[in-house]
Image (spheres, rainbow, N blue to C red):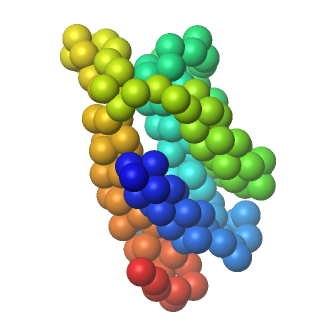
Amino acid sequence: MLEGWLDFHRQTLVAKCAGLTAEQLKLRSAEPSSLSLLGLLRHMTEVERAWFRIRAAGEELSYRYCSDTNEDGDFDDVAEADAAADHAAFLAEIEAARAAVAGVSLEHEFPTERRPAISVRWVYLHMIEEYARHNGHADLLRERIDGATGD
């Protein structure tokens, strides 16, 4: 059930980006913000990887866009980014995240930097919340780009 709700929110973000050019995806919300639809896709790629693959499944991976010296690379470095490649990376990361926790109990716990134990159930709920918040941002960005609004 949680996976279904999460998929709904994932698909909503994809829909908010559909039909736009690379340049439109890179448009910033308003100065000085670095928020863009492409930045949101890149950010959620990082979030999917971090919570499901690195933390919950314990995979030893680096981040795609961010680093210790560039903590906001997902949002900040979109000007020269390949939008099509980043969109494909987002979709691939969702599939990799699904595979990483397939068959893992919602009660499975793992430690994080801040807490001694977090459950996979908590991760799903957090991801639904994260997508819901960012899909609201995506709504505003999309309306600014071409006037499209949606559910």
Left or right: where 116 falls relative to 139: left
Q: Position of residue 19 (x, y in %)?
A: 70, 76
Q: Residue at x 57, y 38 (%)?
A: 98
Q: Residue at x 52, y 86 (%)?
A: 148
Q: Residue at x 58, y 11 (%)?
A: 60
In the rendered image, the vertical position of residue 7 relative to residue 142, given as above or below: above
Quadrant in the rendering for residue 73: top right
Left or right: where 74 falls relative to 82: left
Q: Position of residue 8 (x, y in %)?
A: 47, 62
In the rendered image, the vertical position of residue 5 relative to residue 59, given as above or below: below
Quadrant in the rendering for residue 150: bottom left
Viewer-nearest residue: 115 or 120? 120
Quadrant the C terminus occupies: bottom left
Q: Residue at x 45, y 49 (%)?
A: 3
Q: Position of residue 149 (x, y in %)?
A: 46, 85
Viewer-nearest residue: 34 or 37? 37
Q: Does residue 74 appear anywhere in the picture?
A: no
Viewer-nearest residue: 113 or 70? 113
Left or right: where 40 falls relative to 109: right
In the rendered image, the vertical position of residue 22 relative to residue 105, given as above or below: below
Q: Position of residue 64 (x, y in %)?
A: 63, 30
Q: Does residue 91 appear anywhere in the picture?
A: yes
Q: How many marks?
A: 0
